[in-house]
Amino acid sequence: MVLKPGFLLRGIAVSVLLIFSSGVCAQTAVASKGVLDLRNYPFHSAGTVSLKGEWNFYWHALLTSVKNDSAEHQYFNLPGLWDGYNFKGQRLNEDGYASFHLKLLLPPEKRIYSIEIPYIYTAYKMYVDSFLVADNGRVGSDAKTHIPQFLPKVANFQSSNGEADIIIQVSNFSDRKGGIWSVPRIGTSEKILTARSKNLALEFFTIGALILIGLYQIGLYFIRKEITSSLFFGIFCLLMGLNSLFVGSVFVQTIFPKMSWNWITRIEYITVYLMPLIFLFFINGLFPGYTKKWVIKILTFFTLLACILIVLTTKKFFGILLDVLPLPLFIIAVTALVAIFRAIKGKEHGSRNALIGIIIFMAFIVNEILFGLEYISTGNYLKYGLFIFVTIQSLNIAYIFSKAFEDVKDLTTNLRLTNVSIRRFVPEGLLNFLGKPDIKTVQLGDHKRAEMSIVFVDIRSFTTLSETMTPQENFEFINSYLGLISPVVRSNHGFVDKYIGDAIMALFPGKTEDAIHTAFEILLVLKEYNKTRAADNLPPIRVGISLHTGTVMLGTVGENERMDTTVISDAVNLAARLEGMAKLYDVQVVTTSGTIESLQPPLNFYWRPLQKGRVKGRMEAVSLIEIFNAETDPDAAQKIQIKEQYEKAMQFYHYGKLAEALEIFSAISLELPGDKATRNYIRLCNQYLENGLPENWNGVESFH
């Protein structure tokens, strides 16, 4: 059984629940009145512990030791920020400096401990038992002496008597936040190193995956630029990867320690503001038409305005933007969800999967907020959520692409079948003659002038034949008959231009010999066909074939909603009239002297003149020629034998020597009694001998 993407995404959803369910009971060890008792804490089995709770807080004091200290202090609950905090009746703002003190009660044995120190706003020094173990930036008593820095660190110290005094000096004159928002964690060196290594590995993996996915998706866009969803999702992944470089473990400042803290925070804020908007662009590209354009324009304007303010102002000012960020986030989230719900209603591929991905990511965000507020103790899993979210959306895009690929395959198959069907109505030879690669490129009025041969093939006495058949039998017979002769046309480099009832009109853009070969091959095919009809006691099929070579104009006529191809030429009209002459003289193949003269010897057939005359609608006289060969004409040997006498009689006839002509034609008729051409000349000679020759006689008859 093939696993569908929906089942895979539901499996990921179950894994999310398992991640959240891995949370344990809330930490029981909490600092109280500046003391944290960890003497009974199982460091080796339980891992790290947060130094949260009540710390001693000294405002405007930078202490290294609290022994015999008389500075005023009160208890401050960490994690927390001092802006808005009431210290001895004074309401503090974000600017200032202070010291935080905590006495740790540890197991009595001598042991090395490690403290993992996260973000502290915005510079600090940490002392353990009066020894400096870690610092970040430069702690100062004013804006001139203060230098901010964000760089998580790990500090080590050794406990010898079961106690440790921890003092953290903190100053802030750069941010709208001051204090310790993320509380340090303590544990054995092994536990801290393991936890930090896992965290760094996860961050490296996440950043690398985001960058690779982003570049891959952008690469897809450059291959197929109509897939804008890939472009925006790629940018979204790159922005997340860039953001991860500037937050968390702050890899960028580790690599470039002299990089300005102001620019680090600017890039962090710009990526935070751009990501939701780019994600909305991604949703709009994934499900176009389901998002209001005016909403996108307004959100784009305010996002770009925020980015400009971030670049041009300081953190003290653009930090306000973080407070108003929930509003555009809410609007974007609602807009994206509405678009997805509308896409689900419209039964768009991947819409349900996109909704599952967003819900899972929102669950991780809610978990992060609640965990940060210490309402739950599941853990910090936002990085997992981020990776799962990107994985889901990548799978969803791949799913949509695969469905689109399947649709394209179906469309290609349908198009191929359609093209095959179209070629049944519009011959490929016609397209080639017009210089068109396919039917889509044909325009009304396209035309081309060239010399080609025109062939008409018509069933003799078809009306009489059809009267013996039902309508269904008529159609079955016609299609069976046309199925025999049409392939012969194509095999000789021609194409059928029109089916005219039981007749066909075929064009041969190449050599005249192609048309002549076609005529004889059709006669051979019908010869075999008549054998099967004879076995079924059916009458044989006889045809008349006319062909003529001349200049034609082939092109499209009609109007934009209905077009057809046609041939405009006197040569076509003449070829059509010649087919009637074939019936008049009861010959199989008739052509003109001009066509014969255009051929290069040697000829693989025989010919004889029939008569010179004028066809209807044409003033100029044409010389009618019968062509035949031994394979298709049972009288071929006799026609060859009497050809010299026949041509001599015709000369007498054209010169008006009717008696001499009649004598020869009569002798020929005795040898070839079935020759209708000879009998026709005998009739004409007797007629003119009885009534006299017309004035200005030249031997030319009028054919009607």
Image (cartoon, rainbow, N blue to C red):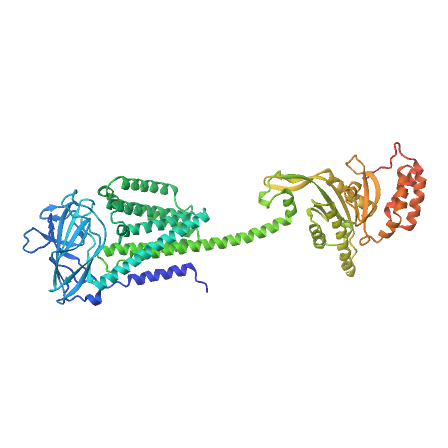
Question: Residue 636: horizontal and vertical position, in percent?
Answer: 84, 51
Inspect this view and state whether residue 266 appears.
yes
User: 466 or 183: which is nearer to us?
Assistant: 183
Question: Residue 673: horizontal and vertical position, in percent?
Answer: 89, 50
Q: Number of callouts in the render?
A: 0
Reply above or below: 497 against 524. Answer: above
Inspect this view and state whether residue 286 appears.
no
Left or right relative to 191: residue 450: right
User: 267 or 468: which is nearer to us?
Assistant: 267
Question: Residue 67: horizontal and vertical position, in percent?
Answer: 7, 56
Reply above or below: 36 against 489. Answer: below
User: What residue is rendered at 17% in x and 57% in y?
Assistant: 52
User: What residue is rendered at 76% in x and 59% in y?
Assistant: 532
Left or right relative to 47: residue 667: right
Q: Residue at the top extreme?
A: 695
User: 363 or 66: which is nearer to us?
Assistant: 66
Question: Residue 169: horizontal and vertical position, in percent?
Answer: 14, 51
User: 670 or 209: which is nearer to us?
Assistant: 209
Which quadrant of the structure image shows residue 32? bottom left
Left or right relative to 653: residue 361: left
Q: Quadrant of the C terminus?
A: top right
